[in-house]
């Protein structure tokens, strides 16, 4: 694994910021790396307020969307709230359903079936709306490219409001209103909202029109925080504000659905990483294994006892998902070895028995072993369907575009994608993709890389240092958890491996005269020989906390170690 030290920021800017904030140059450097250059910017970063959120009316078509919804409420029309089956979609649907339920007596939700309808708006969903007597559909986290589906709804006199954050195509649907900051003619200042975030802006617009304030909407922010974490959008600007206040709700007064999931964990305080680790897989498991409507049922549930029942059911889906992705990943690794493809520039594997709902997770697992662009195919009706994941420096979408003659369809972005192809085209596609990867990648690019924020000594990790780091949360894209390097550390003799397969590494590290600090390295058990017998080594880590029996203590989360 390569360790790459980030370029040092401008010394004068760092020194001035350190002086203004009364912090160390290392902490000031971290802030400058994250685009914070002066006292005022630091104040906004460390002390965000809901009043800093942009006016919803800056978003193109917001006035039309709010007007149409209020008209529907006044005339008691039936409204369908429609969303995708992933975390962003189901939280967005739950948010709008929750907000409108006491304002609309005729309100239903709809989540498409992952396997029979697929992603986004479906003809089947519109037919259901017609049968139910729906006059207005609010689509969340989908719809920006559903030109034919919206035209179909228009023929049936069903209006659409689209709230989507995906990139628009050349043409957009003929909907009553389209809320999407990524539209070229939308002047909304922040472009990185997720689907649930756009749903929140919609209810903000409705609430303002009805004479309410942003404070009335705080209870919905737990849903927005979950979506921001799960959808891996940048945690900057508005997303940082929404996530920070949403995490407060999750920790202080979570909705019964979240409480039912989180009360199983032996933690008192939950971070955005915990949301991604504990909540997101379970919400996603509903759509992967059974149906996304179970997630909406959980998230809109008002009674803890009922939420616990639904949560138990979803937990069985999650356990099945975990067993499937682990067993499918083992089969995929065996296939790579059997075909002697360990040294390829790309991984393309296929098995008709693999579960369509977990192939994306399997692709991510394979990258942990073979760091290279990875595509996992399975059987889907008469076709093959796949999910793909990429690595740094390889534009997956562009690569699929270049190989599109072998595909029926594909979609996604540079980091992740999905596609379908005919069974007889699989080998041609596999060869074409490998050939392209060989052209676009170098051997050096196939080595995982970790960017290091700063080199520090263990003595610099003081209570004040830790406190300021914690105030930089929530961490995520655009504000990643800082990674540090410390050289010439030793283990004090406590080094050992943990786990059934000795896969994890437990350390107690010191440097010169510093106090010892406990450290844990997941999946680093094989490196124990580098740290035994007080041999000096270099340590790559983030600064974390360990909660045990109600006690919280400092712990380093080890990313890698290198022997001297």
Image (cartoon, rainbow, N blue to C red):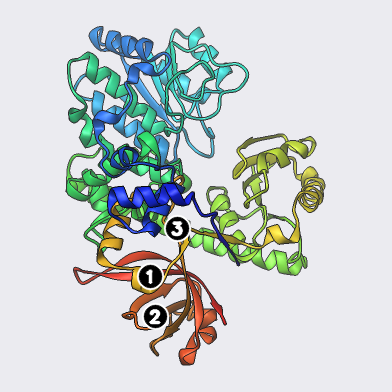
Label of residue 360 in the image: none
Residue neighbourhood size for the residue with mark 3, other residues' Cα within 10 Å, grouped as few (<14), some (14–19), many (≥20)? some
Left or right position of 470 against 424: left
Q: Which residue is label 2 attached to? A: 509
The earlier-in-sequence mark between 1 and 2 is 2
* Residue 382 visible to the viewer: no
Q: Position of residue 135 (x, y in %)?
A: 37, 12
The earlier-in-sequence mark between 3 and 2 is 3
Give SS at disc 1.
strand
Query: For this rendering, which residue is in front, 308 or 18?
Result: 18
Residue 214 vertical position relative to residue 487 in the rendered view, above or below = above
Query: For this rendering, which residue is in front, 242 or 285?
Result: 242
Where the N terminus falls, by quadrant? Answer: bottom right
Residue 449 vertical position relative to residue 526 in the rendered view, above or below = above
Q: Which residue is label 1 attached to? A: 556
The earlier-in-sequence mark between 3 and 1 is 3
Who's the residue at 79% across and 53% down the image? 438
Label of residue 320 in the image: 3
Q: Position of residue 361 (x, y in %)?
A: 54, 54
Q: Nearer the viewer, mark 3 or mark 2?
A: 2
Residue 167 vertical position relative to residue 407 in the rendered view, above or below = above
Query: For this rendering, which residue is in front, 528 or 157?
Result: 528
Could you say which quadrant of the image residue 496 lies in?
bottom left
Give SS at disc 3.
helix
Q: Position of residue 274 (x, y in %)?
A: 34, 55
Who's the residue at 42% across and 34% down the image? 194
| Marks 3/2: CA–CA distance | 39 Å
Where the C terminus falls, by quadrant? Answer: bottom right
Could you say which quadrant of the image residue 333 lies in?
bottom right
Residue 255 vertical position relative to residue 548 in the rendered view, above or below = above
Q: Position of residue 95 (x, y in %)?
A: 30, 32
Give SS at disc 2.
strand
């Amino acid at each position: 694994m390569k360790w790459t030290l980030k370029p040092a920021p401008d010394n004068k800017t760092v020194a001035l910021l350190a002086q203004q904030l009364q912090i160390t140059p290392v902490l000031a450097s971290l802030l400058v790396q994250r685009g914070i250059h002066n006292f005022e910017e630091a104040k906004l970063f460390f002390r965000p307020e809901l009043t800093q959120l942009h006016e919803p009316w800056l978003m193109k078509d917001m006035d039309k969307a709010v007007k149409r919804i209020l008209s529907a409420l006044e005339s008691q029309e039936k409204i369908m709230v429609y969303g995708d089956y992933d975390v962003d979609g189901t939280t967005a649907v739950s948010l709008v359903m929750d907000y409108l339920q006491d304002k609309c007596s005729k309100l239903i939700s709809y989540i498409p079936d992952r396997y029979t309808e697929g992603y986004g708006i479906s003809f089947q969903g519109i037919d259901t709306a017609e049968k139910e007597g729906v006059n207005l559909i609010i689509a969340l986290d989908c719809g920006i490219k559903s030109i034919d589906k919206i035209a179909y709804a228009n023929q049936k006199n069903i209006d659409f409001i689209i709230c989507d954050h995906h990139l628009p195509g050349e043409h957009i649907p003929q909907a009553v209103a389209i809320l999407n900051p990524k539209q070229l003619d939308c002047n909304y200042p922040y472009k990185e909202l997720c689907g649930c975030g756009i749903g929140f802006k919609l209810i903000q617009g409705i609430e303002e029109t009805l004479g309410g304030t942003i404070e009335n909407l705080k209870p919905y922010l737990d849903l927005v925080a979950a979506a921001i974490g799960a959808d891996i959008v940048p945690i900057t600007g508005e997303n940082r504000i929404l996530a920070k206040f949403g995490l407060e709700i999750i920790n202080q007064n979570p909705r019964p659905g979240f409480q039912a999931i989180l009360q199983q964990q032996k933690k008192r305080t939950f971070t955005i990483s915990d949301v991604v680790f504990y909540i997101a897989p379970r919400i996603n498991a509903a759509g992967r294994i059974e149906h996304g409507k179970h997630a909406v049922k959980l998230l809109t549930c008002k009674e803890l006892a009922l939420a616990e029942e639904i949560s138990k059911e979803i937990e069985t889906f999650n356990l099945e998902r975990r067993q499937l992705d682990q067993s499918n990943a083992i089969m995929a690794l065996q296939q790579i070895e059997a075909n002697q493809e360990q040294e390829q520039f790309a991984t393309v594997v296929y098995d008709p028995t693999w579960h369509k709902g977990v192939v994306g997770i399997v692709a991510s697992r394979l990258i942990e072993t073979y760091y290279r662009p990875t595509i996992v195919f399975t059987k889907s009706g008469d076709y093959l369907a796949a999910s793909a994941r990429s690595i740094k420096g390889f534009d997956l979408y562009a690569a699929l575009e270049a190989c599109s003659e072998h595909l029926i369809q594909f979609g996604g972005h540079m980091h992740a994608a999905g596609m379908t192809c005919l069974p007889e085209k699989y080998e041609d596609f596999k060869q074409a993709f490998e050939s392209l990867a060989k052209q676009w990648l170098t051997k050096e690019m196939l080595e995982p890389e970790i960017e290091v924020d700063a080199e520090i000594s263990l003595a610099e990790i003081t209570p004040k240092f830790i406190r300021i780091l914690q105030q930089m949360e929530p961490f995520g894209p655009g504000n990643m958890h800082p990674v540090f390097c410390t050289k010439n550390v030793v283990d004090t003799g406590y080094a050992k491996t943990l786990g059934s397969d000795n896969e994890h590494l437990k350390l107690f590290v010191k440097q010169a005269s510093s106090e010892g600090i406990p450290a844990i390295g997941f999946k680093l058990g094989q490196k124990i020989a580098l740290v035994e017998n007080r041999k000096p080594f270099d340590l790559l880590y983030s600064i974390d906390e360990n909660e045990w029996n109600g006690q919280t203590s400092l712990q380093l989360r080890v990313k890698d170690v290198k022997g001297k």
